[in-house]
Amino acid sequence: MSASAGTGVFVLSLTSIPICYLFNSLIYNNSAEAFFFAGCSTVLILSISARFMLKKKAPVDPLFYVFAVYAFLSVVNLIIGLEQDNIIDGFVTFYLREANPHINTAHGHMISYWDGCVHYLMYLVMIVAITWGDSYQAIGLYWMGSFLTRAIVYILGNAVGKYGTHVSPLFLLHMLYISVSVWACLRIFSQPSTREVQMTVVLDCSGEWCQAYTQQYEPYLKDPSAYPKIQMLVSLLYSGPYYIITVYGLMVPGCEWMTDLTLVHSGALAQAQFAHIGASLHTRTPFSYRVPAGGQLVFLLVNILYALVPQALCYRCCSRPVLFLRPMPDKKTE
């Protein structure tokens, strides 16, 4: 297959920049003509991009089109993050005022950057793999773990946090995005493998050490937005059993599921720790919940180490998968 389809997706994703600026500029006019012009312009830009993307043979894999749309949305999220930091202006001002309040929290801010940078690169890599007919299951499983932990924290954080009463219609649209993504996760997980041989502090523990840790090193765990609490609980319920299963997988040869599981978990922890570390230090987090200057070294050491361990294990499993493959039965010779 020609590379024109993958190039078209890249071009399509970049059209989000003029589209965001166009909508943001015209929407303040609050007139039917403005909306009509913005809508026609958007359709025209997308049509040109789609024609370029499908210039020759259209990809058969439906996830190609899902990731194409997600790449477009990732650039939008990057624009959101940049405008929140006042690096750019006039692109998504209206959205930031009307969207769910969570987008303006430190957690939502870091999620915008993660999706706009890391997820965007993942989508492009998977699109290139689909274009050339290569397997993308490994990077897909990594994205799967990253997406699932983000979705769980988002839904539960909105439900129990201080923004639980500010649910707008955009929340329902986001749930549609999550539903499609879950379908994509199931499709990725069901693909045949092509590899060949080559925490108690959040629960207000009364222990002296736990209380001292939250006060001196990680007060962000007490943030009323509830995202850090949910994040740590998800890590406890998700990572705890994972490491127990991993010990078994490392000791008993032939556990073929080991490599896939480490890819999902390492993607989840990478996203989770990026959002948690960034939000703990971000200026959008109230000062009383930010990491104190004297405790930043310990905080960074603990959390970065917690993020790097699963990445190292994932690299070990993917680079030397022989232990996790079942031995082929010897053919009987007649």
Image (cartoon, grey):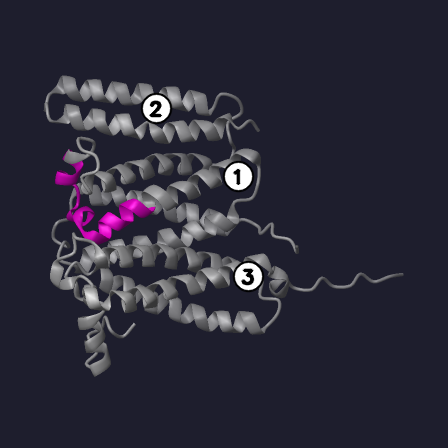
Which element is circle 3 on?
helix
According to the picture, the residue beneath numbered tag 1 turns out to be 129
Which is more toward the observer, 203 or 33? 203
Quadrant of the snapshot with the C terminus: bottom right
> How far is the residue under mark 1 from the one under mark 2?
23 Å
First in sequence: mark 3 vs mark 2: 2
Q: Are marks 3 and 2 in contact (CB under 8 Å)?
A: no
Which element is circle 2 on?
helix
Residue under the point 28% across and 29% down: 17
Which element is circle 1 on?
helix
Image x and y of residue 10, in percent: 41, 31
First in sequence: mark 3 vs mark 1: 1
According to the picture, the residue beneath numbered tag 2 turns out to be 46
For disc 1, the neighbor class at 10 Å (few under 14, some 14 to 19, many from 20) is some
The picture quadrant where one finds residue 265 is: bottom left
Residue 317: numbered disc? 3
Taking 85 as reference, is 331 left or right? right
Residue range corresponding to the magenta coloring: 94-114
What is the three-letter code of the residue carrying label 3?
Answer: Cys
Residue 304 falls within the magenta-colored stretch: no
What is the three-letter code of the residue carrying label 2?
Answer: Leu
Residue under the point 59% across and 73% down: 252
First in sequence: mark 1 vs mark 2: 2
